[in-house]
Structures are given as C-alpha cells and as structure tokens.
Amino acid sequence: MESHDNFAYLLPFIFFVFGCTFVFLQRWGSVSGRYWGIGYISAAFGFAAPLILEKLPLEAQAIVSNAFFLSAFFCYGQALYSRFGVPPALAARLVFSAVALATISYLVMIHDLKGELVASDVACALLLAAPLWQVRGRIRRPIDWLLVSMVGLVLAETTFRLAAGLYLG
C-alpha cells in the first residue's frame, strides 16, 4: 500500500472524531449535539463502509454506504430542528428516508450508477433543505447565522454536484 493510500482512512476518522465530540458535548446541555454527533458518526461509517465491508459484493457496500449517508443527513436535519426548537415531521421524514433508500437500493441492484447518484444527492439535499427552510425564521444570534450558513453551503454543494452531474453526465 502506498503512503498516499492512507488518505482514504483520514476522512472517516475525522468525521468519527467530530461525531464523538458532539455526542460528548451533549452532556453540557447541547441538545442538538446528539444529532450532530450521530450524523457525523453515520457519515464516517458511510465513507468507511467500502473499506470495512470489502469482502461483501459491491452492491451491498453501496447500499450500506448510502444508508449511512441518508442517516447522516437525516440527523443533521434533526439537529437543526432541535437547535431551533422546531417540531420535526419525524414520521414523514422517516418514510421519505425509507423510500429514498429503497429507490437507491433498486438503482444499485440494476447497476444504474447515474440514477443511484442522482437519487442519493436529491434525497440528501431534501433531508437538509426542509429543515433549513423551516428554521429560517428562528435565526437570531450570529452563531446561529453561521451554523445555518454552513448547512446552506453543504446544501448548495450537494445541489451543484447534482446539477453538474446531470448536465455533464
């Protein structure tokens, strides 16, 4: 293994450390810390799934990885709801996530990579867009503006990547 191959382990490790930090911070009253933490840990496992599950078929790796990423974006949305005191539409979000995972899994099984990537990006974007829209009227402090701006940038990047993939693909 080349020394630069270790980079593949760096991103999951960083996300895992961030996740553990947020989960730890919930002990001091950060209600949303639990959701940010679980989200980051889920994303870490999403990035690490192909490394951890290398003995499984590629389809299984892709489905598990996508499930972790959907879980991460679901939790990020929950963290926003929690942070700003907005009641989440939990049942609707869970159903949406289940339908998204079923759709992505189907596309993985029929080997439609472009469809899988589009479905995954759309689902992740919507799992962030709805909470972001719903908390917009409750942003008061500068730190909240920064948080919402960062989440907005993640949403913009996901949307841009989706649009570029559709345009170029």
Image: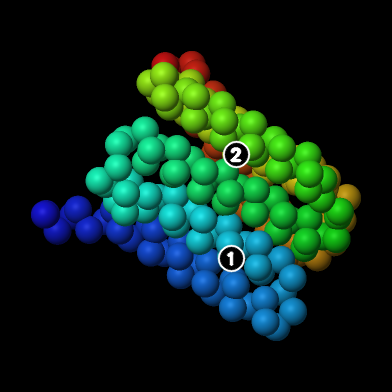
Return the residue found at the far bottom.
28
**Nearer-N-terminus badge (2/1):** 1
Q: Residue 35, percent across and down?
A: 66, 62
- Quadrant where the C terminus is found in the figure: top left
- Number of marks in the rendered image: 2
> How is the model colour-coded?
rainbow
Q: Callout 2, which amino acid? A: Cys
Mark identifier at residue 124: 2
Q: Callout 1, which amino acid? A: Gly
What residue does disc 1 label?
A: 37
- Residue at 66% in and 69% down: 33
Mark identifier at residue 146: none
- Quadrant where the N terminus is found in the figure: bottom left
Residue closest to the eye, 40 or 61: 61
Q: Residue 17, percent across and down?
A: 46, 70
The Cα atoms of the two marked residues, 2 and 1, are separated by 17 Å
Return the residue found at the far left.
1
Q: Is residue 162 visible to the viewer in this orientation of the structure? A: no
The 10 Å Cα crowd at callout 1, few under 14, some 14 to 19, many 20 or more, is many
Residue 96 relative to residue 23: left or right: right
Q: Quadrant of residue 7?
A: bottom left
Q: Quadrant of residue 80?
A: bottom right
Q: In this rendering, is residue 109 above or below 84?
A: above
